[in-house]
Amino acid sequence: MNRASLDKRPDEVATMFDDVAPKYDVVNDVLSMGQTRRWRKVVVEAMEVSKGQRVLDLAAGTGTSSEPYADAGIDVVACDFSLGMLKVGKRRRPDINFIAGDATNLPFADNTFDATTISFGLRNVNEPKKALQEMLRVTKPGGRLVIAEFSQPVVPLWRTMYTEYLMRALPAIAVKVASNPDAYVYLAESIRAWPDQDHLAAWLQDAGWENVTYRNLTGGIVAVHRAFKAADTTPDGAAAAIAAHKGPVAKLRRNITR
């Protein structure tokens, strides 16, 4: 079991998200001090999808992250392992296609989606590396993947202050506004245990994604990674793509923004 799972079984994590589903989006806005919406906007821009294309939104929860695509007339599938989250989302947005699914064993055929995305959910997957391979499988040749995930602040002092907030202030705030405060203690611990930007970039390369880049947001609190699936998906082509993108992560392009 990886560090981010923190000894919780997948069904336990799903139950935890079921419990917090009714207030999940509101609590996230409070705990992120309103930054969540900005982060999600960056993800949508990085996806570069248009009407007529099909998008897979993993760890979609209540569908907040799927709404911009649906509103733009893009065919989006909101997939999550928490039935509680999906039920809340379906009541609010019956026009969005919500599907229950495990990121490590997606219920979709090969080469189904023009683009795949997952926001703030990869660290809660029991086998994230396997999930990255599944995302590659269901994405069309030449398609893209965009991941938004909490990461490691790039300035040491800011990193220390952020860690203190995670482990002290965040649980205290959650007690006042969340239906299941213990869930937010778990989430804070999972953020602290999650690998940094370069390690996630390396995982993407190892899974077979190419042209891996990332952009830091809010000083590195969040990193948005983007990668592409090789156009040649024959066995020889796929093997060549993996071999060609195992170079030093230090050579990856980084875009550091506020």
Image: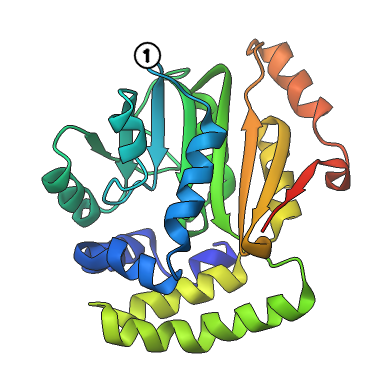
* Residue at which label 1 appears: 52
Q: Secondary structure at mark 1?
A: loop
Residue drawn at 75 percent across, 52 percent down: 198
Instruction: Report which quarter residue 161 is drawn in.
Output: bottom right
Q: Amino acid at mark 1?
A: Gly
* Residue 162, image x, y percentages: 61, 78
In the displayed structure image, the side of residue 173 where residue 157 appears, left or right: right
* Residue 236, image x, y percentages: 73, 12
- Residue 32 vs 242, above or below: the answer is below
Residue drawn at 31 percent across, 49 percent down: 81
In the displayed structure image, the side of residue 190 where residue 108 appears, left or right: left
Q: Residues within 10 Å of mark 1 (few under 14, many from 20)?
A: few
In the displayed structure image, the side of residue 162 where residue 170 appears, left or right: left
- Residue 231 vs 154, above or below: the answer is above
- Coloured how? rainbow
Query: Quick check: can you spot residue 134?
Result: no
In the displayed structure image, the side of residue 86 where residue 53 appears, left or right: right
Query: Quick check: can you spot residue 137?
Result: yes
Is 252 or 217 nearer to us in this picture? 217
* Total numbered badges shown on the rendered structure: 1
- Residue 210 vs 68, above or below: the answer is above
Say which quadrant the C terminus sits in.
bottom right
Residue drawn at 51 percent across, 42 percent down: 43
Say which quadrant the N terminus sits in.
bottom right
* Residue 20, image x, y percentages: 25, 68
* Residue 232, image x, y percentages: 67, 11
- Residue 149 vs 214, above or below: the answer is below
Residue drawn at 63 percent across, 37 percent down: 226
